[in-house]
Image (tube, helix red, strand yellow):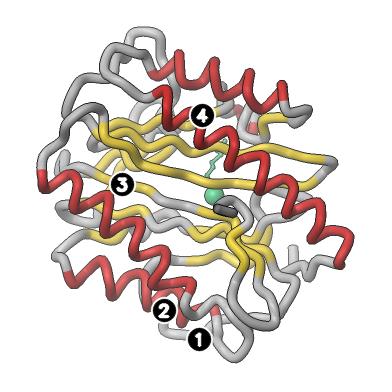
Amino acid sequence: MSVTIKTAREIELMREAGRLLEIVHNQLGEFIKPGITTQDIDRLGEKLIRNLGCTPNFLNYNGYPASICVSVNDEVVHGIPNSRKVLQEGDIVSLDAGLIYKGYHSDAARTYAVGAVSKEAQQLMDVTKQSFFEGIKYARPGYHLNDISTAIGAYAEKFGYGVVRDLVGHGIGTHLHEDPQIPNFRQKRRGIRLVPGMTLAIEPMINIGRADVEWMDDDWTVVTQDGSLSAHYENTVLITEGEPEILTLTR
Ligand code: MF3
Ligand code: CO
């Protein structure tokens, strides 16, 4: 499909989808502590989404069996919640969540510390989040998609981290995944020109070690090949005439 430009009415709906998802994420963030299972997180997340009158968009997406992707330590993304997987002090856990509000999708991810974590783990989370903000400096008219990708990758690589290459961000709207694909590292081509009304899910996935990832036997969970820690940070972003509007981060 081609890149969609949202109308004023659609932008209002995307904004609300984003605002509601931020509420879900904030409540999930407060729930994170040692001793809970990744299934507890999914159960709460699904309930929060439905209580807001929305639908979880990940549930049954290409057969994905849950509402929230919960990825611990060396799991990069798409970890499947499990009643036997208990969070331990010192873990880092990424929560990727999305919802549909009146036909419009939002998508965002956060990585949290479980109790006290190592300095190395904390720096990885901080740099991953900051790489998103480095990228969106270019999320405005006058720039091309590759300006975002280059800025994200260059920032993370300064720290010696591996920038995941096998998974990308994406356009978002009436579908969870729309064009364009948004890599988190420099491309040979400049990509599309950014114009107001585009809504983009920008989502760096960064490893402490090498960039290489592999898929587990469940065909969903993506893990680092070298077993190193990985972090994920994502927001749904609106391109405007000026500063980008982060729809899933309003405060
Ligand atoms: N933010 C993730 C992505 O864009 C959401 C995955 S949805 C899943 O790929 F259902 F496939 F898990
Ligand atoms: Co996404």
Residues tagged 3 and 4 counted as in contact (Cβ below 8 A): no
Residues tagged 1 and 4 counted as in contact (Cβ below 8 A): no
Question: Neighbour class for label 3 at 10 Å: few (<14), some, many (≥20)?
Answer: many
Label 3 secondary element: strand
Residues tagged 1 and 2 counted as in contact (Cβ below 8 A): yes
Q: Residue furthest left?
A: 119
* Quadrant housing residue 118: top left
Residue at image mark 3: 231
* Quadrant housing residue 116: top left
* Residue 139 vs residue 52, the one in the foreground: 52
The reply to whether residue 192 is visible in this rendering is: no
Q: Amino acid at mark 1?
A: Arg
Residues tagged 2 and 3 counted as in contact (Cβ below 8 A): no
Q: Is residue 213 above or below residue 36?
A: below
Q: Residue furthest front?
A: 251
Q: Amino acid at mark 2?
A: Gln
Between the C-alphas of marks 3 and 4, the distance is 20 Å
Residue at image mark 1: 190
